[in-house]
Image: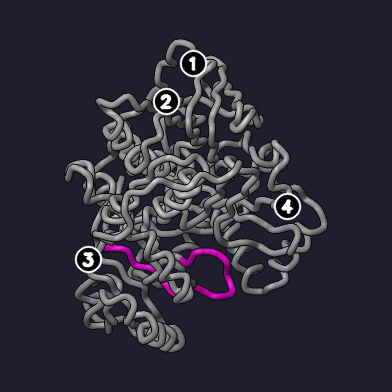
Amino acid sequence: MPSTVPNPIASPDAPSPGAAEDRVDVLIVGGGVCGTALLFELARYTDLSRLALVERYGRLAQVNSRASSNSQTIHCGDIETNYTLEKALSVQRTAAMIGRYGELLDPAVRDRCVFRTPKMVLAVGEAECALLRRRFEQFSPHFPAMELLEPEAISEWEPRVALVNGVFRPEPIVAIGIRNSPTAVDYEALAESFVAEARRELAGSARELDLRLGTMVEAIEPEGDGFRVRLRPGPGSAVAPGELRARHVVVAAGAHSLLLAQRLGYGLEYSCLPVAGSFYFTPDLLNGKVYTVQNDKLPFAAIHGDPDVRAPGKTRFGPTALLLPLLERYRPASFWEFLRVLRLDGAVLAVLWQLFGVADIRNYILRNLLFEVPWLRRRLFLADARKIVPSLQLEDLSFARGYGGIRPQLIDRRSQRLLLGEIRIEAMPGLSFNVTPSPGGTCCLGNALRDVEAIAARLGCHLDRGRLEAELLGNPGEGGSAEATPQAA
């Protein structure tokens, strides 16, 4: 695994003359992996002449796409036991796009973004083993790379998972493994590569990319058949205020998408319940990713162990799950932003009551609160981590300070239920807000494709569908270049 890579886009672009009156075809708000994926696809597969992206920080991918803020995983549905077969097949299609995108890159760049490692989901105990065997029978026809691993095979893949002092651990174990596939991602480096490739695509042409780092959106107002977007400096930025006029606007800013939407009067039917995850480091104990069986009563990720792509020689275990009143981890000022998107009322309280009314969820939440208590947290987490590495010792564990992000889970106040997937708020033709909790990074290119198709249909631009499908979806010869049919605004 490589060490930390430098960000090649670390300071705001100098504004062009007359920037306050700039006009663009598409404005993307948010420089994480989802917003930059959309920028790449628009640059490579359409003929739109002016594209713009604004990001509140002076660097790309500094919130949930940051390498330290997520599990660095491509979620393909094969080892995630909380996925139904239908969901797994849907996620598999979009997850594979990241690996195919990697093949378009120079190998030196690809090796900083996408990593091939073995991975498995581990069952411990009779009940979990029986569940995993049934799952293998159901899923393996659709995932031919799957292997059912008995203890001997597990010990070959991951000795510390199967053995304690050279002897097989006493509990029954079985695993489903994938031997070699694109498995781990540095989503921060991936976002940087999307922008670099978009620039490469436009180089030497009359087409333009307006990248504005350290810039926030103050307001979005309909104007004619497009939008007038007022901009202001982001945190710690000296960028001058300005305006853009855009024919189409996509906001892909995580939890801040909902914040901006509600500030403009859209998406008021949703509330945000931020779930934070913390991690622990150990020495290099695993060869690849090892997941555990999900408790189907818990809407939170089960613990897993992963070699960290930015910390050579270390394995990262986690995440824990903590309901945290922040929109950004480690930015206390985002508490006030959280209050605005919580929109606390009877519907939100009803959902919280439902969650805490389930004993498994209540006990899990309370236990995860203790995981944040110094001295106590390592001792409590050790018991959970030993499910993966039974010989793990307390001195092997250290709290990963500064690691972990925020997962913006939404509550539908109308139906009074917690939503586990992404939400796309269609405010009006040409203006949408995307809120993408996990697996948003995995589906970044798939979600971008959905937005590209909507943009092409509305703006009537050329979309090279054949090239896109051949390169990202693995459908050579299908589709074809076509003019999209304009849609009334």
Q: Secondary structure at mark 3?
A: strand
* Callout 2 secondary element: strand
Instruction: Identify the image quadrant of residue 71.
Output: bottom left
Which amino acid, by three-letter code, is at mark 3? Asn
Which secondary structure class fits the magenta region best? loop
Q: Amino acid at mark 4?
A: Glu
- Return the residue nearer the eye: 235 or 105: 105
Task: Indicate which disc residue 19 carries.
Answer: 1
Q: Nearer the viewer, mark 4 or mark 3?
A: 4
Question: Where residue 373 sits: x, y (%)?
Answer: 56, 52
In the drawing, what numbered circle is on residue 210? Answer: 2
Tell me the kind of residue under disc 2.
Asp
User: Residue lying furthest top in this view?
Assistant: 17
Q: Earlier in the sequence, mark 3 or mark 2?
A: 3
Q: Earlier in the sequence, mark 2 or mark 4?
A: 2
Q: Is residue 220 left or right of residue 48?
A: right
**Mark 4 element type:** loop
User: Given this view, does label 1 or label 4 mark the residue nearer the observer?
Assistant: 1
Q: How many marks?
A: 4
Quadrant where the image shows the C terminus? top right
Residue at the disc numbered 4: 269
> Image height check: is 17 above or below 71?
above
Q: Is residue 33 magenta?
A: no
Alpha-carbon span between mark 3 and mark 2: 39 Å
- Mark 1 is surrounded, within 10 Å at the Cα level, by few (under 14), some (14 to 19) or many (20 or more) other residues, namely some
